[in-house]
Image (cartoon, helix red, strand yellow):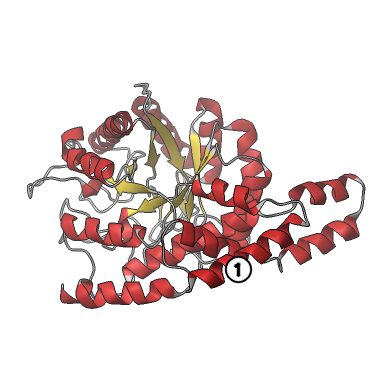
């Protein structure tokens, strides 16, 4: 898109927003300081490097077989960098424990160490991309239906040790990058059919978590992620939202809200103000649940927009971490990264451009017609011209121009794999 057109459209947008008391330059500056945590697993369909030929399990599925997925660490890193080059701003990278640099050798999960992620730490520094981390309880011979809540002590201890080591790795990442590494804990534990031992499994999980969190760290932050149900575990989930909310409040842990892990009619946005009152921070995993946790690419829909607006309305950008968590293997994977990331940014920008002071004044004065009217008119304000300027300032393709760049990379790189 021609630079002169972008600048002229922005000039008009700037004037239009000024009439409702919004400084678009400040909104762009605020968006510049929001660093999305890009998920490494979109590039290779959650395969990882522990056992590239292994099968996904534990409720994890990547659907589709679009050609050109990353087959090794070099290809994965190249794809991530290409995607990042088309997303304005600077962002983080979220790694799962199975993505270590294992040197072609099998290292079981209760044996992983910080040294297996040193090359990632160095790579992140080289490319100005800070790291976040996740323990990996799925796709392993000892995963089964239960991991940290398994009645078999030997299996439970295996996963406790794995998660302890993940926290130690996250600590080293945070120390190396002089910024806390967000370490997310999610397990698939549950039951396909009815259980008569709901409390028992949750007591086991509580004991496991207490052991895992015994060691305090300064350079990482713990997150605990709930789920509604899993494939093959439809009747009972040990780590439900109620469970982790209780544990998070009691032990002051960050609760992770995955937008695909709730009933489809449930508002994730409504949970933001609740959690902010009782937990230190919030972690978001943003995806698009077409049919529950189907992990479609995030788009600029009402759910994502409501979520972003609630964060900004609560003035909580410094307490809410935003990561992406989808894996679509049916379309170009780099394109999926870019569409989802830019859609999230567009929602955040619209939230930053909302004339919230006028809206709150109307509400305080009981002018409810005026509040509704301005909320509707706000939808027509030229936020897209502001986003185009954000892209231009970051030397990133403006508008639909990124499509051609993704196609070029496919023709020159991924199609030859």
Tell me which corner region of the image, top left, top right, bottom left or bottom right, holds residue 76.
bottom left
Q: Position of residue 197 (x, y in %)?
A: 45, 42
Seen as rendered, the residue at the extreme front is 4
Q: Residue at x 61, y 38 (%)?
A: 275
Q: How many marks?
A: 1
The residue nearer to you, when weighing 305 against 164, is 305
Q: Position of residue 361 (x, y in %)?
A: 85, 46
Tell me which corner region of the image, top left, top right, bottom left or bottom right, holds residue 179.
top left
The residue nearer to you, when weighing 120 against 255, is 120
The residue nearer to you, when weighing 341 against 101, is 341
In which quadrant is the C terminus drawn? bottom left
Q: Position of residue 282 (x, y in %)?
A: 53, 40
Q: Residue at x 61, y 31 (%)?
A: 278
Vertical comparison of 237 with 344: above or below: above
318 to the left or right of 173: right
Seen as rendered, the residue at the extreme right is 366
Vertical comparison of 203 with 312: above or below: above
206 to the left or right of 108: right
Q: Position of residue 64 (x, y in %)?
A: 32, 74
On the question of residue 117 being in view, the answer is: yes
Query: Mark 1 highlights which residue?
Result: 8
Estimate how packed mark 1 is, as few (under 14), some (14 to 19) or many (20 or more) residues with alpha carbons within 10 Å.
few
On the question of residue 301 being in view, the answer is: no
196 to the left or right of 45: right
* SS label for mark 1: helix
389 to the left or right of 169: right
């Amino acid at each position: 898109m021609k630079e002169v057109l972008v600048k002229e459209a922005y000039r008009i947008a700037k004037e239009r927003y000024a009439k409702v008391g919004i400084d678009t330059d400040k909104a762009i500056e605020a968006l510049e300081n929001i660093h999305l945590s890009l998920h490494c697993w979109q590039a290779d369909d959650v395969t990882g490097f522990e056992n590239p030929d292994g099968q996904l399990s534990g409720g994890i599925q990547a659907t589709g077989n679009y050609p050109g997925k990353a087959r090794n660490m070099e290809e994965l890193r190249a794809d991530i960098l290409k995607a990042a080059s088309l997303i304005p701003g600077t962002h983080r990278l979220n790694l799962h424990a199975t993505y270590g640099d294992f040197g072609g050798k099998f290292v079981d999960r209760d044996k992983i160490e910080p040294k297996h992620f040193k090359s990632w730490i160095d790579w992140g520094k080289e490319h100005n991309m800070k790291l976040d981390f996740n323990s990996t309880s799925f796709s392993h011979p000892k995963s089964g239906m239960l991991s940290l809540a398994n009645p078999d002590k030997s299996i439970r201890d295996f996963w406790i040790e794995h998660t302890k080591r993940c926290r130690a790795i996250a600590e080293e990442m945070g120390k190396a990058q002089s910024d806390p590494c967000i370490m997310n804990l999610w397990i698939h534990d549950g039951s396909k059919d009815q259980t008569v031992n709901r409390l028992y499994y949750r007591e086991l999980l509580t004991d496991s978590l207490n052991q895992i969190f015994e060691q305090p760290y300064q350079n990482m932050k713990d997150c605990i992620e709930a789920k509604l149900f899993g494939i093959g575990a439809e009747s009972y989930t040990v780590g439900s939202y109620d469970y982790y909310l209780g544990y998070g409040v009691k032990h002051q842990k960050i609760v992770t809200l995955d937008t695909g892990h709730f009933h489809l009619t449930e508002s994730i946005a409504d949970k933001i103000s609740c959690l902010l009152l009782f937990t230190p921070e919030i972690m978001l995993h943003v995806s698009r649940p077409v049919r529950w946790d189907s992990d479609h690419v995030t788009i600029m829909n009402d759910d994502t927009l409501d979520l972003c607006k609630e964060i900004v309305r609560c003035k909580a950008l410094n307490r809410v971490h935003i990561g992406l968590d989808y894996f679509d293997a049916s379309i170009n994977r780099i394109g999926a990264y870019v569409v989802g990331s830019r859609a999230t940014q567009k929602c955040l920008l619209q939230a930053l451009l909302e004339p919230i002071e006028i809206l709150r004044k109307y509400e305080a004065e009981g002018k409810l017609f005026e509040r509704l009217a301005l909320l509707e008119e706000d939808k027509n304000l030229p936020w897209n011209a502001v986003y185009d300027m954000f892209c231009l300032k970051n030397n990133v393709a403006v508008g639909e121009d990124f499509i051609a760049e993704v196609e070029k990379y496919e023709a020159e790189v991924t199609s030859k794999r």
